[in-house]
Amino acid sequence: MSAELDSILPKMESTHAKFKAFIAGLDGAAVQQPSTGNPWNPREIVGHLVDAERAHRRFIEAVAAGNPPAKVENFDLNAWNAGRVAKRANQSLEELMAAFDEERAATIKVLEALPDDAWEKSGDHAALGHQTVEYVARIIGLHERAHLQEMIG
């Protein structure tokens, strides 16, 4: 296991366990209540994290394989997020959490398979600008943690 993975994976797994425990403790009314500082409710936040995780992982896979994505001009992150949340409007919290767990398992599998030299490779991330694989891998857990903090208040 690489030093980068040794640093990232325990934090990512700890954050995800805390996130899941928090979500599991919500009642039906709380699931529909918008979070502090975010107009989305917990169900919508989970859906957002599913899509963000997939997008971050695809960036990591492409850059690590030597096929970084093309630079996206005028990318509107808010519009992308709103569109993705809207597409998941009919999914239950249980369905979204299952999808989130699947995405996280896929991300961990990708990160565990990265060769040591992949962590420093970089490319143009649509929302984050020019970043390394390591930076985007770290963002995944930090992003989840930030949304957890919003929900906890």
Image (tube, rainbow, N blue to C red):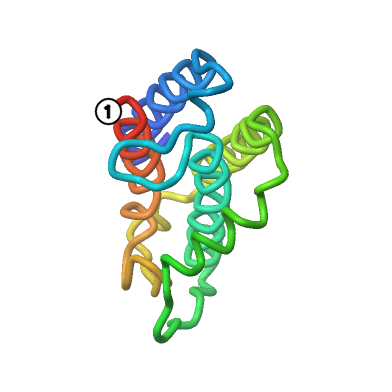
Q: Tell me: residue 81, above or below residue 11.
A: below
Horizontal side of 29 relative to 150 (left or right) equals right
At x 45%, y 82%, the residue is 72
Query: Residue 11 in the image: x percent, y percent?
Result: 34, 28
Residue at the location (53% across, 32% down)?
Answer: 32
Element marked by disc 1 = loop
Image x and y of residue 141, in percent: 38, 39
Q: Residue furthest bottom?
A: 73
The image quadrant that residue 118 belongs to is bottom left
Q: Quadrant of the N terminus?
A: top left
Query: Whole-percent x and y of residue 86?
Result: 61, 56
**In which quadrant is the C terminus drawn?**
top left
Number of residues whose C-alpha sits closer than 10 Å to that of mark 1, classed few (under 14), some (14–19) or many (20 or more): few
Total marks placed: 1
Residue 134 position in % (x across, y down): 34, 52
Is 45 located above or below residue 52 in the figure?
above
The picture quadrant where one finds residue 18 is top left
Three-letter amino acid code at disc 1? Gly
Residue at x-position 48% and y-position 41%: 45
Is 112 situated above or below 39? Answer: above
Image check: 11 left or right of 84? left
Q: Nearer the viewer, residue 12 or 25?
A: 25
37 left or right of 100 in image = left
Residue hosting label 1? 153
User: Relative to the observer, which residue lies in front, 89 or 145?
Assistant: 89
Q: Residue at x 30, y 37 (%)?
A: 36
* Between 141 and 50, the one nearer to me in the picture: 50
Instruction: Give residue 100's quadrant in the image.
Output: top right
